[in-house]
Image (cartoon, rainbow, N blue to C red):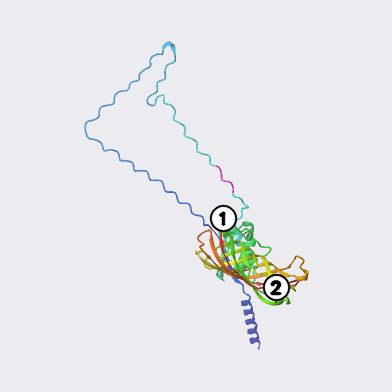
């Protein structure tokens, strides 16, 4: 039994050591550059070969050179100084000009003994983080995987690329300074070894400048003034006169007020935003002689302020459909007929109510090549409230959905 027990223990220890073995990783940091290399200076042209001396001529000897005699200057009149005669040959020649002294070269300043090598600094930080990550160890030989970091110099700091062979993942930091290398190493190692985006490794203690100093470019849109006219169709249960002497009864009615809209439309490529105001004016009014007992209710008017979000199906096209949705806050006014014995010169009372409407719409813009173009639009709305209001003359208790159709111009 003893050999069997020994084999079991040995196998267990071997499997345990294999299970808890660290992945050996070699870390390297490379300083690179993406600046354009300076063009090499063209070499100076070689001096032309000196011409060979002319061949001696065969013929009579040339005549001897004429004899040069010194001419003494005449004595100056009135005992003045004798003029100087330039000397010929080497006798009395002026001294040769002195050569210019060589330029004095300034000595190079001594190297700063405290200057940090960024590649060595970052490499050591990375090795520390790799070794402290469970299941990994930073080594110099017998590598199982490699962690390669590239530094590309900027005017200030570096752009950093990191790649780990174990997951084939690559991450980038747009800008890092020397004083951020500790946080940079921590985030790069965790992101690469654990196969996560570096943006998911941020904590309160390792924020880099690049995380907060970002220059964002925005899309320039176009702004337009919108004017539209149309009609609405509303459905409501309202008290309705049944005759001069009969009490009103609640009936379903279709109301068709006129609709006038003014708004602002902002277009951002395939998207749009409408901020609008709308006025609905009632077109139906029952005479007081038809309701002596009072209580009949007519729709008078309503006002809305809303926002709609749009999406264009053909954003660059000359013509395009669009669809969207939004919401509007509405205040609606009804008029109720007073009883005949309580009129005293005032025949109607006002009833006010209001709330939020949710809407969906579809539309079509055309002639969009011009800054002034046109649109047609249909919008369906569903109130998120009940119209519930009353006074001594009567009251309303209804839900009033509807739709609006309009055409208009966009400036």
The secondary structure that most of the magenta stretch takes on is loop
Residue at the extreme bottom of the image, as rendered: 1
Residue 143 appears in view: no
Mark 2 and mark 1 residues within 8 Å of each other at the beta carbon: no
* Few, some or many residues within 10 Å of mark 2 (<14, 14–19, 20+): some
Kindly state the secondary structure of the residue where label 2 is placed: helix
Residue 184 appears in view: yes
Q: Residue at x 47, y 32 (%)?
A: 98
Q: Position of residue 306 (x, y in %)?
A: 65, 65
**Does 107 lie within the magenta span?**
yes
Query: Please, is residue 382 above or below residue 409 in the view?
Result: below
* Few, some or many residues within 10 Å of mark 1 (<14, 14–19, 20+): some
Query: Please, is residue 57 above or below residue 213 in the view?
Result: above
Q: Position of residue 146 (x, y in %)?
A: 56, 68
Q: Quadrant of residue 53?
A: top left
Dot label at residue 154: 1
Residue at the extreme top of the image, as rendered: 78
Q: Position of residue 285 (x, y in %)?
A: 67, 69
Query: Please, is residue 104 above or below residue 97 in the view?
Result: below
Quadrant where the N terminus lies? bottom right
Q: Work out how far the residue at label 2 is from the one at label 1, CA to CA, in angstroms.
A: 86 Å
Dot label at residue 198: none
Q: Report the front residue among 112 and 151.
A: 151
Q: Position of residue 22 (x, y in %)?
A: 61, 72
Read off the residue under disc 2. Answer: 290
The residue range painted magenta reads 106-110
Kindly state the secondary structure of the residue where label 1 is placed: loop
Quadrant where the C terminus lies? bottom right
């Amino acid at each position: 039994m003893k050999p069997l027990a020994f084999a079991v223990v040995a196998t267990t220890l071997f499997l345990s050591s294999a299970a808890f073995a660290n992945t050996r990783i070699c870390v390297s940091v490379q300083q690179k550059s993406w600046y354009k290399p300076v063009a090499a200076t063209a070499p100076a042209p070689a001096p032309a070969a000196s011409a060979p001396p002319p061949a001696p001529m065969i013929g009579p000897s040339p005549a001897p050179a004429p004899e040069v005699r010194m001419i003494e200057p005449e004595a100056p009149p009135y005992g003045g100084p004798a003029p100087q005669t330039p000397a010929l040959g080497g006798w009395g020649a002026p001294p040769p000009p002195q050569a210019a002294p060589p330029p004095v070269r300034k000595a190079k300043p001594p190297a700063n003994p405290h200057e940090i090598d960024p590649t060595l600094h970052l490499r050591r930080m990375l090795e520390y983080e790799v070794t402290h990550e469970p299941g990994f160890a930073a080594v110099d030989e017998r590598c199982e995987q490699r962690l390669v970091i590239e530094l590309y110099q900027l005017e200030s700091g570096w752009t950093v690329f990191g790649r780990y062979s174990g997951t084939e993942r690559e991450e980038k930091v747009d800008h890092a300074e020397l004083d951020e290398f500790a946080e940079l190493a921590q985030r790069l190692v965790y992101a690469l070894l654990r196969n996560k985006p570096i943006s998911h490794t941020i904590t309160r203690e390792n924020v880099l400048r690049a995380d907060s100093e970002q220059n964002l470019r925005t899309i320039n849109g176009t702004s337009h003034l919108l004017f539209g006219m149309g009609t609405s169709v509303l459905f409501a249960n309202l008290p309705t006169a049944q005759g001069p002497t009969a009490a009103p009864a609640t009936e379903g009615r279709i109301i068709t007020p006129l609709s006038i809209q003014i708004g602002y439309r902002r277009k951002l490529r395939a998207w749009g935003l409408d901020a609008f105001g709308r006025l609905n004016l009632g077109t139906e009014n029952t005479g007081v002689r038809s309701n002596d007992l009072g209580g009949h209710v007519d729709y008078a008017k309503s006002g809305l302020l809303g926002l709609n979000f749009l999406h264009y199906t053909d954003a660059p096209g000359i013509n395009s459909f669009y669809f969207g949705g939004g919401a509007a806050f509405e205040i609606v006014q009804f008029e109720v007929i007073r009883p005949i014995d309580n009129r005293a010169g005032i025949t109607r009372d006002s009833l006010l109510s209001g709330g939020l409407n949710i809407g969906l719409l579809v539309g079509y813009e055309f002639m969009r090549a011009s800054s002034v173009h046109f649109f047609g639009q249909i919008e369906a709305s569903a109130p998120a409230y009940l119209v519930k209001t009353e006074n001594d003359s009567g009251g309303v208790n209804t839900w009033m959905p509807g739709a609006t159709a309009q055409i208009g111009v966009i400036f």
